[in-house]
Amino acid sequence: MSRERHLVIWLAVLTVFCVLVYLLKSMLLPFVAGMGVAYFLDPVADRLEKWGLSRTLATSLITAVFFAAVIVLLVLLVPLLEGQVVAFIGRLPGYAAALREYAGPLLERLRTIVPAGEMDSLGDAASTYAGQAIKWIGTILASVWSGGVALFQLISLVVITPLVSFYLLRDWDRIVERIDVYLPRESAPTIHDQLSKIDRTLAGFIRGQATVCLILGVFYAVGLSLLGLEFGLLIGLGTGLISFIPYFGMMVGLAVGIGVALAQFSDLGSVALVAAVFAVGQVAEGNFLTPKLVGDRVGLHPVWVIFALLAGGTLFGFTGILLAVPAAAVIGVLVRFVLESYRDSRLYEGLGDDAGDRR
């Protein structure tokens, strides 16, 4: 079979797979979450196997401990976060009024500098873009809600995810061996090499970035709470959780934290301390946490990660957000492979077949 025929078959398989994912997106969340948990815990299972435990026993122990820890955290944190979320929503009008008082003198000073016509144009443009941004964010949130946080999805997430995690973690090596049997023998070494690169990329981002987000969430929550910032626990944990979106998480947390601080504190020194917490977290992330825990194995540009997350959330809801980074990693590795193959080909050198034969 020619290489062109092989390519057509693989493209057809990929197309069918993408169509199935789109059609089944409403039921995939617990399976995707289970696969993510299993992938995250696989190194621990391998380590326990080396220590003499059977794969089944190691998987049972790891799964039980992991989900027990998750349940304990939820039991401890959910009541606190629920109260803070409700109170924060109730305080939003007061925060908006306080920020308007702060912004009033600045706007008046700006009016003395900028001509009235241009000031009105700036105001209209800001209102238009703000309305579009809110509508766009609302569309994504509605897609995430309808695709991932319905009652049935939550129930299936609680029931199915631990089962999927357990069986995938237990049978992972056998699944890999079974798939390997069906790979084209001629292309198997190349496929193995690319899959190894994909695994390194995913491990560096998912496992490393998850650890970074956890550390940042705890740091921000503790730091803001110690400063006495209202809803510091909610803001800190939220900032840490969305820090996997490059720059976006920190900027959102900083904006919310500074806004609450301006409305709460009467002195700018306290506001500066809140900003300092985020500055220290950003410095620690950029210079210590990310280089040590994620490293340079990822090879995913921040813009590519942001695009993948937004596209996944828009198309597939919360399931798409979970699939976005793995899909981006796979596409990134494959694109680099195609570009390397192109640079090694006669097409890159500008040589035809005849010229190549003469050489």
Image: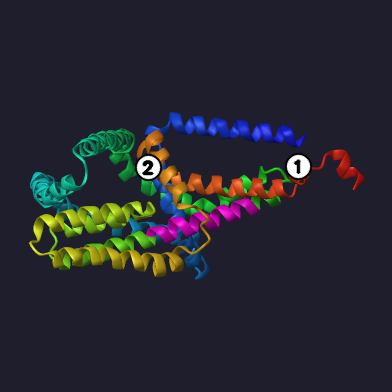
Count of numbered marks? 2
- Residue for point 47% across, 66% down: 48
Mark 2 vs 1: CB contact within 8 A: no
According to the picture, the residue beneath numbered tag 2 turns out to be 30
Any part of residue 71 in sight? no
The image shows residue 267, relative to residue 259, as above or below, that is below
Query: Colour mode?
Result: rainbow
Q: Amino acid at mark 2?
A: Pro
318 vs 119, nearest the viewer: 119
Q: Position of residue 111 (x, y in %)?
A: 17, 45
Looking at the image, tell me whether mark 2 or mark 1 is earlier in sequence order: 2
Secondary structure at badge 2 equals: helix
Badge 2 density bin: few <14, some 14–19, many ≥20, Cα 10 Å: many
Q: Quick check: 222 above or below 259?
A: below
Percent x, y for residue 197? 59, 55
Asked whether residue 214 is in view, the answer is: yes
In the rendered image, residue 38 lying in the magenta stretch gets the answer no
| Residue occupying image coordinates x 37% and y 65% | 285
Q: Secondary structure at mark 1?
A: helix
Q: Report the residue at 46% width, 62% height from top.
A: 294
Q: Is residue 54 left or right of residue 189?
A: left
Q: Which residues are magenta?
A: 193-210
Q: Nearer the viewer, residue 152 or 111?
A: 111
Quadrant assignment for the N terminus: top right
- Image coordinates of residue 277 in percent, x first then y, are 25, 66
Which residue occupies the extreme right position in the image? 358
Comparing labels 2 and 1, the label whose residue is closer to the camera: 1
Q: Is residue 198 magenta?
A: yes
**Where is residue 231 shown, x and y percent of the image?**
15, 56
